[in-house]
Amino acid sequence: MQRTTLSFANLHQHGALFSNMLRARHRTFIEGMHWELPTADGMEFDQYDTAQSRWVCVHAGDRVLAGVRLTPTTARCGVYSYMVRDAQRGLLDSIPANLLDDTAPIADHIWDANRLFVAEGVATDIRHEVQLSLMGHMVRSARELGASTLIGLLPIAVPRLGRRLGIDMEPAGPLMKFGGVAHRCYFVSMASKMH
């Protein structure tokens, strides 16, 4: 099992990994959860898949097992910033504007974590290991990018995984369902765990 953080600067070093990650997102979010998202050639993408973002992948060669996208809360691309903030601003029809209890933050040390998934077909006997690997590498990558906090609209099962790794996650908004899966915004504090 390998862990890679992709960026526009290193995509050329990783062959088909980026496009395979977008295909895995398509299978997870469009085919599996029936979310209405942009798609082309069997790949799911949106306005946040820009050079400002990073994509954390757990993979076996070119086969993507899990992934998550990290976007700085200072990001700007046209009218868009980052997913949680843009939803709060009413720019996203598919996510209610009341997803946060407070105003969405904008700060160099806070990054948005979204599109977290474990690919369909990951064997049950390694699924937990894949989840923990993804969470651990997400935190390491975010720290390397200068983040001490993540904010994300995540499945409610994620905090339980975080606790196993010593990651503090605090609810930041109400419970919501997307594709039949309960989600909530969380602040993921990494400051106390940084070494």
Image: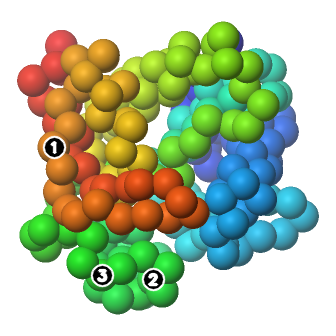
Report whether residue 58 is seen: yes
Whichever of callouts 2 and 1 sits on the residue coming sooner in the sequence is 2
114 versus 99 height, above or below: above
Q: Mark on residue 40?
A: none
Whichever of callouts 3 and 2 sits on the residue coming sooner in the sequence is 2
Q: Quadrant of the C terminus?
A: top left
Q: Mark on residue 170?
A: 1
- How crowded pointer 2 is (Cα within 10 Å; few <14, some 14-19, many 20+) is rated as some
Check whether the beta carbons of the residues at disc 2 and disc 1 lie within 8 A of each other.
no
Who is closer to the viewer here, 2 or 78? Answer: 2
Who is closer to the viewer here, 71 or 127? Answer: 127
Residue type highlighted by circle 3: Ala
Check whether the beta carbons of the residues at disc 3 and disc 1 lie within 8 A of each other.
no
Dot 2 corresponds to which residue?
Answer: 92
Q: Position of residue 28 (x, y in %)?
A: 69, 50
Report whether residue 148 is seen: no
Residue type highlighted by circle 1: Glu
For the point 56% across and 73% down, the residue is 47
Residue type highlighted by circle 2: Leu
